[in-house]
Amino acid sequence: MSHLEESMKFTPLDLTGLLIIEPQVFEDVRGFFMESWRADQFAQQGLNVAFVQDNHSRSQRGVLRGLHYQVQRPQGKLVRVVQGEVYDVAVDLRAGSPTYGQARGVLLSSSNRRMFWIPPGFAHGFYVLSETAESLYKCSDYYAPEHERCLLWSDPALAIDWPLLEGRLPLLSEKDRKGLPLALAEPCRIGEGRV
């Protein structure tokens, strides 16, 4: 098996474009090593992504961030958790998509070391399950606040089964509290911005 085939496993989800990526981890008594990004392996999957921005987020238990997206200049995101555990969610908001409005969630943690590829046109958010969590994500376009929108995390139309701790409501920003339901959401226009 070649190095390309060994270092990352790509598993597509049932919403076209979403991928779980599991890096090969080399671990011993000293610690571990893994490759967290390889352009050539993404290209083998048909993804010629040029990342332009890296983000680092730290949040406490019970915080929910999202569901954020940009209607123009949509961002593809490669998300991973380097400390703690989160439930990470993507919602298809690509105009004309046959799976428009459908959501998928995955558990990302510093122990499972999974990564989640969320292509442009999806809203993204996460809920923190551990005492604290730190997420890193690479973006395929720059943050453009004039094009940012927020989808309401709790909209029943999304059918997201958030694993809320002890059934408590999450800690939200004012912006996230005022997110719009899917019925009023503006879809993403793919092709307006970078890939």
Image: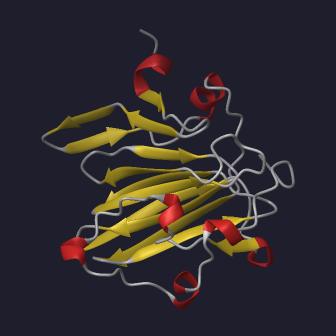
Q: Indicate how the structure is coloured in the image.
A: secondary structure
Above/below status of 145 relative to 101: below
Q: Position of residue 39 (x, y in %)?
A: 62, 34
Identify the residue at image location x=50%, y=20%. 4
Can you tell which quarter of the image residue 71 is in? bottom right
Q: Is residue 106 left or right of residue 145?
A: left
Residue 87 position within the rendered picture, expressed as x and y whole percent measured from the top left: 36, 59
Quarter occupied by residue 35 = top left
How many dots with numbers?
0
Please identify the residue farthest to the top as the structure is shown. Answer: 1
The location of residue 79, given as percent across then percent down, is 49, 53
Q: Residue furthest left?
A: 29
Instruction: Write the residue at 67% across / 33% down.
Output: 47
Residue drawn at the location 76% of the way across and 58% of the way down: 188
Q: Is residue 27 left or right of residue 25?
A: left
- Name the residue furthest bottom: 174
Quarter-wise, where is residue 180 in the image?
bottom right
Vertical comparison of 58 with 177: above or below: above
Q: At x 37% / y 78%, what residue is drawn?
A: 63
